[in-house]
Image (tube, rainbow, N blue to C red):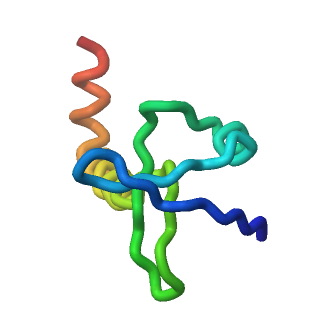
């Protein structure tokens, strides 16, 4: 595990933190990219991956299986 320290700084009426370039490069992040702050039992996790996306994909896959024939028919049009 790599540990990096950063400082929370004021940005207008909010606050923000800087992410070192090495971490931005490693996770292929750039200015303007969205990140998600997830509260965990260990503290706070900052991630570029939407934690709700996995749940949404599971729901989609369930529907796609249930309506496989209909989806196939629609794809032929």
Residue 75 or residue 1, whichever sits in front:
1
Residue 61 or residue 4, whichever sits in front:
4
**Seen in the image, is 75 located left or right of residue 29?**
left
Q: Is residue 66 visible?
A: no
Residue 56 or residue 19, whichever sits in front:
19
Quarter holding the N terminus is bottom right
* Residue at position x 42%, y 32% in the image: 32
Please say if 63 is above or below 72.
Answer: below
Please say if 6 is above or below 29.
Answer: below
* Residue at position x 70%, y 37% in the image: 25
**Seen in the image, is 64 located left or right of residue 4?**
left
Please say if 65 is above or below 5.
Answer: above
Going by the picture, which residue comes out furthest to the top?
77
Q: Position of residue 14 (x, y in %)?
A: 28, 54
Q: Position of residue 10 (x, y in %)?
A: 37, 53
Please say if 14 is above or below 71.
Answer: below
Q: Is residue 14 visible?
A: yes
Quarter holding the C terminus is top left
* Residue at position x 77%, y 65% in the image: 2
Q: Position of residue 66 (x, y in %)?
A: 26, 52
**Seen in the image, is 66 located left or right of residue 34?**
left
Number of numbered callouts drawn: 0
Residue 26 or residue 10, whichever sits in front:
10
* Residue at position x 75%, y 43% in the image: 22
Give the quarter of the image for residue 21: top right
Q: Position of residue 33 (x, y in %)?
A: 45, 36
């Amino acid at each position: 595990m790599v540990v990096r320290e950063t400082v929370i700084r004021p940005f207008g009426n909010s606050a923000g933190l800087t992410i070192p370039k090495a971490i931005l490069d490693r996770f292929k992040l750039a200015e303007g990219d969205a990140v998600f702050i997830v509260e965990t039992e260990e503290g706070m996790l900052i991630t570029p991956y939407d934690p709700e996306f996995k749940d949404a994909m599971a729901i989609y896959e369930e529907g796609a299986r249930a309506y496989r024939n209909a989806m196939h028919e629609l794809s032929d049009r």
